[in-house]
Image (cartoon, rainbow, N blue to C red):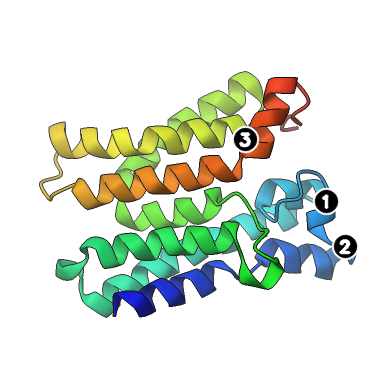
Amino acid sequence: MTFWIIVVSYILGSIPFGYLIVRARVGADIRKSGSGGTGATNVSRRAGKIAGILTLLLDAAKGFTAVLIAYLWVGQDAGGWPVGLAGLSVIAGHIFPIWLGFRGGKGVATGIGVFLLLAPIAVAMASVIFLTTIWLTRYVSLASMLTVAALPGIIWWQHRFGSATSDSTVLVLTATLAALLIVFAHRGNIARLLKGTESKFR
């Protein structure tokens, strides 16, 4: 069962919405524009803000749907690692899509969808970091990395000192591994940030 949850989640994550939207809208390959990613930020720069917003929503929906399927498959009380692996697999599918030669997006929007279902309060708290960083620096990539890096700690804090009573071990590990995946996908952005050539949000 866990094997099939991983497979289904990965395939779902591999659906390249950003690539398909840009191809349909302007007839271009988004992988040859800007950062080369298929995510919402690069799509908005190539095909407009509406296309970017649509990509953001669809990519987030992939993450949410994969986790929801896993929940329904194993039952909420039996979530644990099957659900956590569903979240990691759908993010990996988005970053390394089989249909595009394993070259996709950065996994941020898909990760939002995953943790909106797994840890909605933590996502709301982490969004403050994202918005503050955007406001101060105008770098979407930096804001994204700082946000996902903070998410495991926020989840741990919520379960340790907040109202949550369930065991947070699997959730914290899932968030940590997801953050590592997403930061790895931003390695090109990190290089540009260090060189001072990273594009700012307008």
Asked which secondary structure carries label 1, the reply is helix
Residue at 53% x, 74% y is 11
Identify the mark nearer the N-term, 1 or 3: 1
Q: Amino acid at mark 3?
A: Ser
Could you tell me the amino acid type at mark 1?
Arg
Picture coordinates of residue 153 (x, y %)?
A: 30, 33
Q: Where residue 46 is drawn, which disc sits there?
A: 1
Residue type, mark 2 in image: Ala
Q: Secondary structure at mark 3?
A: helix
* Residue at point 45%, 57% (across, down): 113
Can you say which quadrant of the picture contains the N terminus? bottom left
Query: In the visual, does 135 lie left or right of 70?
Result: right
Q: Marks 2 and 1: in contact by CB < 8 Å?
A: yes
Residue displayed at 23% across by 37% down: 156
Mark 2 element type: loop
**Residue 184 image position (x, y, % from top left):** 55, 42
**Residue 91 % position (x, y):** 49, 58
Label 2 sits on residue: 28
**Which of the two labelled residues, at mark 1 and mark 2, occupies the earlier sequence position?**
2
Of callouts 3 and 2, the N-terminal one: 2
Cα distance between the residues tagged 1 and 2: 9 Å
In this rendering, the label closer to the viewer, 1 or 3: 3
Q: Name the image quarter holding residue 163.
A: top left
- For label 2, the crowd category at 10 Å Cα-Cα, with few meaning under 14, some 14 to 19 and many 20 or more, is some
| Tag of residue 141 | 3
Please tell me in which quadrant of the rendered image residue 202 appears.
top right
